[in-house]
Amino acid sequence: NLSNQVNTVITSANSLTGYDPTGQNTGPLLGDMTTQQIPSALQQAITAAVTGASLGDASAAGLGVNSDGTISFDQTKFVAAVQANPSAVENLFVNGLGSAGTGIAQRLQAASDAASASKGAYLTAAIQGSQSEIQTLGDEISAWQPILDAQQTMLQTEFSNMETMLASLQSQGSSLAQ
């Protein structure tokens, strides 16, 4: 159902960005504000009042937010709302037409698009930014490689010359000692 799907996303985002003081289960995206936006955007899409809907907000249809930030679903309350006024429940979820609508389903779609649509979405932009940074760092590594190779060759030559000089000095020292 809707709440389970949203909870999967919220739980994943929270897990990826979570902090564990023991360091055992700290999320790999700790501190990543882009990922931290996802749960609040989904919660807001579900719980904010729906303008023009006679039921007002999702709580009238059994949806709410748990203390851990996941979405709760009260099936008894939902069924009672549908039985009492099915068109009001429908209007709560789909209010208006298309992307201009303000229903819960439309706001969830808008939150999803804002995060992950192919152009202009904040997750897409963050991924593209990270990919660009990776490419730049790879280019910098490639640019440094010939310099480092030359430095390595120079140091190996210098070390080899020092070893030769040391062997020569040891040989001279042995000759003088005899």
Image (cartoon, helix red, strand yellow):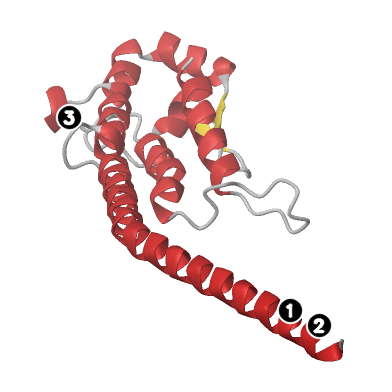
Q: Do the residues labelled 2 and 1 touch (CB within 8 Å)?
A: yes
Which secondary structure, mark 1? helix
Cα separation between marks 2 and 1: 5 Å
Please tell me whether residue 106 is drawn above or below residue 158 in the rendered image: above
Crowding at mark 1 (Cα within 10 Å: few <14, some 14-19, many 20+) = few
Dot 1 or dot 3: first in sequence order is 3
- Write the residue at 28% across / 14% down: 87
**Nearer to me, 68 or 112:** 112
- Write the residue at 61% across / 49% down: 18
Which secondary structure, mark 3? loop
**Nearer to me, 65 or 27:** 27
Q: Which amino acid, by three-letter code, is at mark 1?
A: Ser
Please tell me whether residue 122 is drawn above or below residue 74 in the rendered image: below
Q: Name the residue under label 2.
A: 174
Q: Name the residue under label 3.
A: 101
Q: Mark 1 points at which residue?
A: 171
Q: Do the residues labelled 2 and 3 touch (CB within 8 Å)?
A: no
Q: How many labels does the image show?
A: 3
Q: Quadrant of residue 96?
A: top left
